[in-house]
Image (cartoon, rainbow, N blue to C red):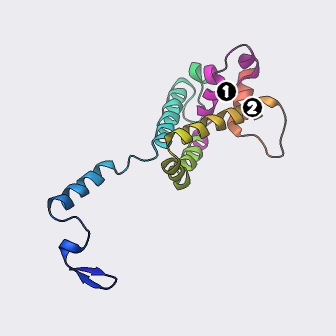
Amino acid sequence: MTPAPVGQRCPEHSGKPQGASRISSGIRRGAFEGTGAVVTKALLGLNIFVYVITAAQGGGLNSPGGKLFTDWLLFGPAVANGDWWRLFTSAFLHANLIHIAFNMYFLSGSSARRSSRHSGAGASSLLCIVSALAGSAERLSGRRTRRRSAPRARCSACSARR
């Protein structure tokens, strides 16, 4: 018997799957659990992958560098000379271990996963692209806002001038 608002219901009339259909619906549901927030998971993986490469090419975990870092660095004169991809790729560069740790912590937070699941992969991808472009545009504008720029952006700009 199944409890109902007006008493008890027998299994045949409870509206719940019975027998083999009950078992197969549980298997079907279990197969799809954990596949939400695809964009968030892809960004986490890509950010960590790029950081590991730049840390290996550079001076270690707290001082990434190397060819990939300098090729993807947001540097105004390089963007003006046609390296437009730097507007996007600079979003994947991090200055040190604490920088990537905090960024990945907040990226993997419940609100990011929830918004990715509810709005879909297309909307989440568009939000990430627009955010990367807006951050690059603010950095290249040369204007100082009341808040200080991100440490990665300051360090990247300094290392590009050397």
Q: What crowding class fits label 1: few (fewer than 14 Cα within 10 Å), some (14-19), or many (20 or more)?
A: many
Question: Which of the labelled discs sits on residue 40, or is there none?
Answer: none
Residue beneath disc 2: 137
Q: Is residue 134 left or right of residue 93?
A: right
Q: Nearer the viewer, residue 140 or 73?
A: 140
Q: Is residue 158 left or right of residue 72?
A: right
- Look at 60% across and 25% down and name the residue there: 65
Q: Nearer the viewer, residue 94 or 128?
A: 128
Position in image of residue 13 (x %, y %): 22, 73
Q: Nearer the viewer, residue 160 or 107?
A: 107
Element type at mark 1: helix
Image quarter (top left, top right, bottom left or bottom right) of the N terminus = bottom left
Position in image of residue 6 (x %, y %): 32, 85
Label 1 with label 2: CB-CB less than 8 Å: yes
Amino acid type, residue under disc 2 in the picture: Ala
* First to last magenta residue range: 70-99
Position in image of residue 15 (x %, y %): 26, 69
Q: What crowding class fits label 2: few (fewer than 14 Cα within 10 Å), some (14-19), or many (20 or more)?
A: few
- Look at 69% across and 26% down and name the residue there: 74
The answer to whether residue 158 is above or below residue 17 is above
The secondary structure that most of the magenta stretch takes on is: helix
Q: Nearer the viewer, residue 56 or 80?
A: 80
Q: Residue furthest left?
A: 19
Amino acid type, residue under disc 1 in the picture: Leu
In three-dimensional space, the C-alpha distance between marks 1 and 2, rounded to whole angstroms, equals: 8 Å
Position in image of residue 40 (x %, y %): 50, 43
The answer to whether residue 26 is above or below residue 51 is below
Q: How many marks?
A: 2
Q: Earlier in the sequence, mark 1 or mark 2?
A: 1
Residue beneath disc 1: 87
- Look at 56% across and 41% down and name the residue there: 123
Residue 83 in magenta? yes
